Amino acid sequence: MKPNLLIVDDERHTRDGLEMALEDKFEVFLAANPNEAFNVMNSEPLEVVLTDLKMGSESGMTVIDKAISLEHKPICIMMTAYGEVDVAVEAMKRGAFDFLAKPVNLEKLDLLIKRGLDTKKLEKENQNLHHRLDKKFSFDGILGKSQALEKVLEKVKLVGPSRATILITGDTGTGKELIAQSIHQNSERSRGPFVPVHCAALPSNLLESELFGHEKGAFTGATDKRIGRFESADKGTLFLDEIGEIDSATQIKLLRFLETKSIERLGSLKTIEVDTRLVCATNKNLLDMTQKGNFREDLYYRLNVVTIGLPSLRERDGDIPLLLDHFLSHFSEENNFPRPTLTAEVIGILSSYPWPGNIRELRNLCENLVVLNRGGKITSYDLEPRFFNRINQGSESSQAFSSNLLVEENEKRLLRNALLQSGGNRTKAAELMGISRRTLHRKLVRWPELDIQKEAN
C-alpha cells in the first residue's frame, strides 16, 4: 500500500500541482486550512505532512504542532515564501523535519521526503532494538529461580540506577557479561552505548591503546588517530572483562580515570573528560593478587565499590532443567531443526553433573544435541562419558561402586554406538568393538535394551 501524505495549502493550484506530482508514490490527502488538516489527521494515519506556513490569517505552525502530538508521528515539511527562513527554522525546533522555499522544486521535495522516511525508519528500528535489548537483559530475561540467583538479581536492581563502579566476580562461564548488560539496561544510561572489552584477549601493548586511544604517530604503526573504548562508551557503560589480566601501566591509567573521570590518548598531553560508567569482571581473587603484588591495592579498592558474586551453575539448585529447556528451544529455532526431548533419566544425570564450564558448557551441550539429533528422544546413550564421571566423596565402597558404574555405562554406550554404526549387524558390531561375536551376544543377553534388532521388531 502507498504511504499516506497530507498537503495543506490555501492555494488550490499549489495543492493540485503537488497532488499530481506525488500521487504515483503516495495516497494523497488535501486540506485548504488547518481545520481541514486536523480532520484528516484524526481519521487517517499519515506518514508525511507537507504544509504551507502562511494560509491567510492562519499559520502552518498549528499543523506542525498537531502532527507531532499524534501517537503515530508523521514527518513534517514546511513550505515557506522567500524571506521566511527564520520562521521555518522555528518550525524545525518545534518538530518539523525540514523546510522548502516556494515555489517548490519537485526534485528537491522528492529527495527530502525520501530522506525523512529513511530517517523515520531508522528511528523505528532503533526503538525496536532498544525494546529487544530491554527485554533480553531485563531481570525477566535472566533464566533461573534458585535462591542464589535471586540474591544476585536483587543486588543488580539496587545498583543498576546508581553511578557506582561495579566489580562482578565468578567462575568462567557463569554469565558475568550478561549481568553487566543487565546493569546497563536497568540504569539511566540504557540509551547510551554498552562497550565490552575482554582484556585477556589483547596483548598488553595493544590494550592501553584500545582503551584510551592514540594520536597519529604515537608509536610505530600509529598511522591515524584512534578513539579509545573509554571515549566510545561516553554517556554509557564500559565493561572490562578479566580485569585481573591488565598490566601495571594500564592499571595506573585506569586508576587515574577513576579518580578524575578523565583520560589522555597515547601520544597526547590533552586531558579528555568522559562520562563513562565502569563495570569490571574477573574470575580471579583480586585481593589475593594485591597481597602478592600482582595488582595495585589502590586500584582494587577503587574498583571494589560494589561487588556482585555470581554463583556457579552447581550452586543454582533447580535452574538446570530450565536452562536446558531454554537452550534446546533456542538452538532448534536458530537452526530450524526439530527440538529434541530429554528423558527423565538424562535430566537427572545433567542436574547432578557439576558443570565445571558453567552456563557456557551447558549451552554448548544443548547446541550439540540439537545439531546432532535433530528431534527425537535424547537418552543416556547420547551423552558423553564425562557426564557419568561422578565419583562420590566418602567411603571406599561407594567410590568403587561409582567406578564400576562408570565403566558399565561406558561399555553400554560403546556397544550401542557399534550396533548403530553397523545397522544392527552383530558381526560387524563385534569387529568394531574388538570382541568376539559370542562375547557381544552375552552382553546383549545382559543388556537386552541395547539390541536395536529387537527395537526394529
Image: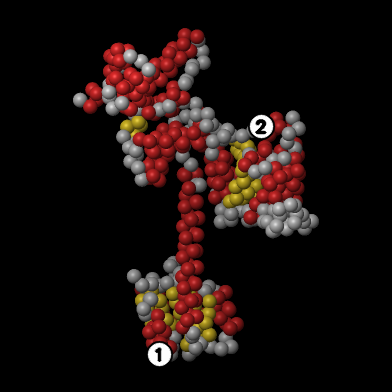
Location of residue 381 (image quadrant): top left
Q: Is residue 264 visible from the viewing direction of this image? A: no
Image spot of residue 380 (x, y percent)? 37, 25
x 49%, y 59%: residue: 127
Sequence-first tag of 1 and 2: 1
**Mark 1: few, some, or many residues within 10 Å (few <14, many ≥20)?**
few
x 52%, y 32%: residue: 357
**Residue that label 1 marks:** 12
Q: Nearer the viewer, residue 24 or 273?
A: 24
User: Would residue 422 be found to the left or right of residue 157 on screen?
Assistant: left
**Mark 2: few, some, or many residues within 10 Å (few <14, many ≥20)?**
few
User: Would residue 66 be found to the left or right of residue 157 on screen?
Assistant: left
SS type, badge 1: helix
Image spot of residue 11 (x, y percent)? 43, 90
Location of residue 287 (image quadrant): top right
User: Would residue 89 be found to the left or right of residue 300 on screen?
Assistant: left
443 relative to 34, above or below: above
Q: Nearer the viewer, residue 264 or 317?
A: 264
Q: Split into 4 quadrants, where in the image is the C terminus?
A: top left
Which is more foreground, mark 1 or mark 2?
Answer: 2
Mark 1 is on which residue type? Arg
x 50%, y 59%: residue: 126
x 33%, y 19%: residue: 430
Q: Split into 4 quadrants, where in the image is the N terminus?
A: bottom left
| Disc sitting over residue 434 in the figure | none
Count all numbered tags in the image, as a single digit: 2
**Residue that label 2 marks:** 285
Q: Nearer the viewer, residue 400 or 424?
A: 424
266 relative to 403, above or below: below
Image spot of residue 454 (x, y percent)? 23, 22
Q: How is the image coloured?
A: secondary structure
SS type, badge 2: loop
